[in-house]
Image (cartoon, helix red, strand yellow):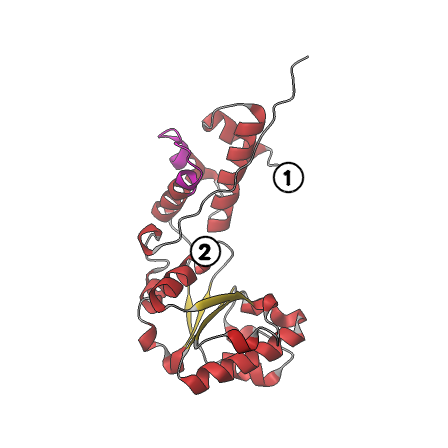
């Protein structure tokens, strides 16, 4: 009997600096806004786009250049409010619909930043004007943020993203693999991330090379990656 193949899925080290960000028509406006936070009306900006569209990477670029801080929206609490400075990014702020306490903290954080003449960056999947918060005062304040949307990626961008994801995992795919994946994959950054993660997992667990044969099998019968 063949012994079961042991796998060790090491976390990918995602490079999140400015040099690692791939500028393209779908994200050029967002990148320009991040690199010029002095132009934000009243110091406020909302980055909007689907999962995996590059919002977190852009936040990382802004944090590095501005010296600001980042907090996950659901992690906002009254206890953490006093420690914030005057340059804050709140990620996934649109997910606070079911978190009224966090909404209250975001409201106070907004007022703090506004009074300090600082910078407040929020991210979400839809524009703030559509965030039906239960705290009306917060909804009204966020609805007037300058909003920059990240558009869907084209073939060139998807190819570059796949290449970066493979590099993050120290994988050198065959030359024909990325064009093959781009033709068959769902057209989103999130889909690209899932593809590379599953290819890496299957290659390790089945002791096989990452190539078009493995990719074809995976695309025809996708599987959940164990946590």
Q: Is residue 139 visible?
A: no
Secondary element type, mark 2? loop
User: Residue reaching furthest front?
Assistant: 83
Mark sitting on residue 226 = 1
Does residue 153 lie above or below 109 as drawn? Answer: above
- For mark 2, what is the residue? 53
Q: In x, y percent, where is residue 85?
A: 45, 76
Q: Which range is magenta?
A: 165-179
The residue lying toward the viewer, choosing from 131 and 75, is 75
Query: Which residue is pictured at 55% across the width and 34% down the height?
Result: 201
149 part of magenta stretch: no
Graded by Cα atoms within 10 Å as few (under 14), some (14 to 19) or many (20 or more), the crowding at tag 2 reads: many
Query: Which residue is pictured at 45% across the width and 60% down the height?
Result: 55
Does residue 19 lie above or below 206 as drawn? Answer: below
Q: Is residue 12 left or right of residue 23?
A: right
Query: Which residue is pictured at 42% across the width and 57% down the height?
Result: 57
User: Residue reaching furthest top?
Assistant: 1
């Amino acid at each position: 009997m063949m012994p079961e193949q042991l796998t060790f899925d090491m976390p990918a080290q995602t490079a999140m600096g400015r040099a690692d960000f791939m500028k393209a028509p779908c994200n050029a406006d967002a990148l320009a806004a991040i690199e010029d936070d002095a132009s934000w009306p009243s110091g406020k900006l909302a980055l909007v786009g689907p999962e995996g569209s590059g919002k977190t990477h852009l936040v990382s670029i802004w944090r590095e250049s501005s010296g600001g801080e980042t907090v996950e929206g659901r992690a906002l609490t009254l206890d953490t409010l006093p420690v914030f400075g005057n340059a804050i990014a709140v990620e996934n702020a649109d997910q606070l619909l079911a978190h009224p306490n966090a909404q209250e903290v975001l409201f106070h954080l907004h007022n703090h930043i506004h009074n300090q003449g600082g910078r407040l960056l929020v991210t979400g999947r839809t524009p703030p004007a559509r965030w039906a918060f239960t705290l009306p005062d917060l909804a009204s304040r966020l609805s007037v943020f300058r909003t920059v949307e990240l558009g869907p990626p084209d073939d060139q961008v998807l190819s570059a993203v796949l290449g970066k994801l493979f590099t993050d995992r120290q994988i050198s795919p065959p030359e024909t693999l990325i064009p093959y994946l781009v033709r068959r994959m769902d057209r989103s950054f999130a889909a690209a991330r899932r593809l590379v993660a599953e290819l890496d997992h299957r290659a390790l667990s089945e002791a096989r090379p990452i190539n078009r044969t493995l990719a074809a099998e995976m695309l025809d019968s996708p599987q959940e990656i164990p946590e």
